[in-house]
Image (tube, rainbow, N blue to C red):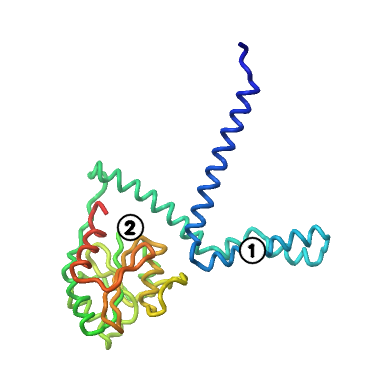
Amino acid sequence: MPFNLFYLERWDISFRLIVDIALLGCLVYWVYKLVKGSIAVKCILGCLIVYLFYWMVQALQLKVVASILRIWTSPIVPIILFQREIRHFLFSLGKSLMGSKAMVVQIIPWLTDKKNEIDVTPVVKAVQTLGGSNTGALIVFTKDADLRYYEESGDLINAVVSARLLMAIFNKYSPLHDGAVIIHNNRIVAARCILPVTEHPNIAARFGLRHKAAVGLTEITDALVLIVSEESGQISIARKGTMENNLSAQEIRSALKEYLSNDA
């Protein structure tokens, strides 16, 4: 039986079409997960309405209106409107790559230098004391994320972590109490730092600016943030854009150790 190139070519086209559709489906699903529950959904609907109206205007050959709408259908408009979602998407890709690197390090641990793990006891003691006196606090822990931009928004300290120092920083009469403390590699790098506030509408109204700033930072970095509520004294942890509330000292200790461990 002669070899039929027609069937081979048709099979090749079908296979490529299946791969194309599968990749498109994955991309649409990923975008849906990123924008689900955020104001980006309404922005997308608004953009679709503008695009549909633009096509109708073009079909009717209304040149003046079409020239105005052409500005709003420029490829740069979605980049401006969805810069937060695009940043989150790229961060997710990078985080996946870092996750692959972490797996390699687990198998071959000598490929990277081990980092000094922070002693979490001073931090746990400090937040317990601050919570007991209803003193608000915002403490950021970072391993791999580059937070220099946020560090430079505050006052650089570069001091060893201690409960006494943390309590002094967040004392209501301290000039450094308003803002976040950033801790990296067993040192308090900076205090009075400004963090990005989340735009997610599902954050409960009872949470204040500290909680929203904590969630906002963890949406775009791999940081873990401790929050002490000034109103209730409750201690919360934000990570990966989510928040756990009213945690005990043991729960805080476990969460910090898990995050700061070399294989986390």
Task: Indicate whether 199 appears above or below 73.
Answer: below
Q: Is residue 209 above or below residue 4?
A: below
Which residue in the structure is indicated by mark 2? 144
Identify the residue under disc 1: 47
Label 2's element?
A: loop
Q: Is residue 19 left or right of residue 168?
A: right
The N terminus lies in which quarter of the figure? top right
First in residue order: circle 1 vs circle 2? 1
Kindly identify the amino acid type of the residue bearing the numbered disc 1: Cys
Quadrant of the snapshot with the C terminus = bottom left
* 171 lies left or right of 4: left
**1 to 253, vertically: above or below:** above
Q: Classify residue 219 by image quadrant.
A: bottom left
Give the residue type at disc 2: Asp
Q: Residues within 10 Å of mark 1 (few under 14, many from 20)?
A: some
Please state the horizontal and vertical placement of residue 24, each as a whole percent of the image. 55, 46
Give how far apart the Cα atoms at labels 1 and 2 are: 36 Å
The answer to whether 204 is drawn above or below residue 104 in the figure is below
> Which dot, 1 or 2, sits closer to the camera?
1
Q: Residue at x 61, y 64 (%)?
A: 45
Coordinates of residue 48 in the picture (x, y in percent):
65, 61
Q: Position of residue 25 (x, y in %)?
A: 53, 47
At 17% from the left and 71% from the top, the residue drawn is: 122
For image coordinates 50% across by 67% down, the residue present is: 38
